[in-house]
Image (cartoon, rainbow, N blue to C red):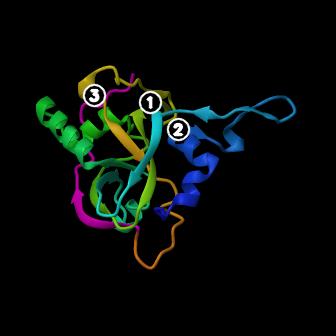
Amino acid sequence: MTAFANGTAFDEPGSRLSAMGTDTSRSRAIVDSLGHVLAFARTGGMIDIDRRELGAGTTIYRFGSARPPRDVAKGAWWIERREFEKMINFADSNGISIGMAMRLLCLVPIEWSDASVLIRGRVSQCLLAWRGLANSVVAVMTNRRGTVNMPHSNEIAARRLHQLFIPGLRELDAPLPVISVEAVFHLSSKAGAQGFIYL
């Protein structure tokens, strides 16, 4: 039986909710007059999710903001090599930057990441992930003057891209990292936002 480094974190009910974009913070929940939680807010995340096993040696990719690469690698959202290659082809065929392609296919507004860093990681210990398609996003603009609306386009084959949500990476404290950073690419945050329009 395979031992997964993040098995405990994956099995927590909250990990699936987080992968689906559910904010389980009580301070932002919808409550009744007595303070009982009626529903949690949900935006982004993934739909049609299922369990994915990532074996040692698997190559994965992650976009992030300018921080030390090891910190970027502790984030939960990743894509596999095949999906990354699809993203590159999408960027090339549409004449846009890889950062902008990531925004369109993974539905990541500017408010969530400046996409100024791309890392290629290699799974060092077996991990469990949630895998699914991007869900629509409604988020508050940075200037708080409105909302960002990004509807998913999963019905269009060229825009359908599976993502990974790997829970527990930030909490894992091992002698060796569970994902080793193989390469770091610095991207233009301006190019990654060029053509991004608020609707």
Residue 159 — which label? 3
Tell me which corner region of the image, top left, top right, bottom left or bottom right, holds residue 40.
Answer: top right
Q: Residue at x 41, y 52 (%)?
A: 53
Whether residue 183 is in magenta: the answer is: yes
Query: Foreground residue, 107 or 173?
Result: 173
The residue identified by callout 2 is 21
Query: Foreground residue, 66 or 74?
Result: 74
Tell me which corner region of the image, top left, top right, bottom left or bottom right, holds residue 101.
Answer: top left
Residue 29 locus on image (x, y percent)? 69, 36
For marks 2 and 3 on the same chain, the one whose residue lies earlier in the sequence: 2
The residues colored magenta run 178-199
Query: Foreground residue, 141 or 186?
Result: 186
Residue 195 locus on image (x, y percent)? 25, 31
Q: CA distance from mark 2 to mark 3?
A: 19 Å
At mark 3, the secondary structure is helix
Q: Residue at x 82, y 35 (%)?
A: 36
Q: Label 2 is placed on what type of residue?
A: Gly
For marks 3 and 1 on the same chain, the one whose residue lies earlier in the sequence: 1
At mark 2, the secondary structure is loop
Residue 15 locus on image (x, y percent)? 56, 48
Q: Label 3 is placed on what type of residue?
A: Arg
Residue 113 locus on image (x, y percent)? 39, 47
Q: Is residue 11 above or below residue 183?
A: above
Residue 135 — which label? 1
